Image: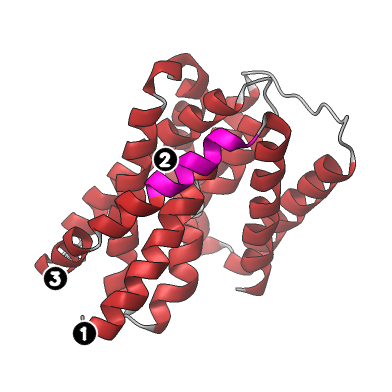
Amino acid sequence: MTLKTYSIAFIIVFISAFVQAITSFGSALVSMSILPFILPMHFVTPLVALNGTCITALNFIRHHQHFDPVKIMPLIIGALFGIPIGIFLLVHMPESIIKKSLATVIIVYALYSLSNSNAKIHTNQKAGYIFGFIAGCLGGAFNTDGPPVVVYTTTQHWSKDQINISLSSYFLMSGSMLIIMHTVGGLLTKEVAYSFITLLPAIVLGFFMGSIVYTKIDQLMFKKIILFLLITIALLLIIK
């Protein structure tokens, strides 16, 4: 990367880490929306996977005391069954239909939750298998497994720290699997690894600043931020 490209990438990665330190997801949304304009897609995809997994690992370490494997086990089990179905759908079903259907459900849920501050949409733990299955399908087909997982965690009676660690633990698992797939597929090159290392200061700085903001927001504001970010992701799914 040239100095100019590196400077732009540094700012983008900083913002990505900042956002994810607050919400536990969203770094890929920021990075994949901008980085492809300055770097080749085959370079950006594994780089974003490395960055996102690194940020997730930092988030997991920060909230490890709240980790409860029982909370995410249904999601993981469901996802394992959903991934092969997603691969099948990728081959046999139009991408636009699946993505737009998902986006519509997310927008309706997020807008309803935002417009009804007293709304208490709740799902039990068994629903985690369904949300995990849907996430696995979307991950296997389009690498967009995040929204169903986020929706599920926001329908639980969990604190923001419990939501944070649950999202972090799930995405740490899925991110690690993604890195392995990129490595086996030959996308994770020495150049990508070197760029990741040189951008670590942006990750650490963004994560540190985001962590400070995270401690200042209450439970209600935390959920609103997540819902607004979900709407943004849903709109991008429709546009793309």
Q: Is 49 located above or below residue 167 in the figure?
A: below
| Callout 2 amino acid | Phe
Percent x, y of residue 20: 47, 48
Residue 78 appears in the rendering: no
Query: What span is colored magenta in the figure?
Result: 207-217
Residue at numbered disc 1: 2
Specify which label sits upstream in the sequence, 2 or 3: 2
Look at mark 2 in the image and give the residue it sits on.
171
Q: Is residue 41 left or right of residue 95?
A: left
Q: How far across and how far down the image is residue 164, in percent? A: 51, 32
- Residue 240 in the figure: left or right of residue 173: right
Going from N to C along the chain, the mark reached first, 1 or 3, is 1
Mark 1 and mark 3 residues within 8 Å of each other at the beta carbon? no
Residue 167 position in % (x across, y down): 49, 35
**According to the image, label 3 marks what residue?**
191
- The one nearer the camera, 102 or 192, is 192
Which residue corresponds to the image point at 37% horizontal and 22% vertical from the top-left?
Answer: 64
The image shows residue 222, relative to residue 128, as above or below, that is: below
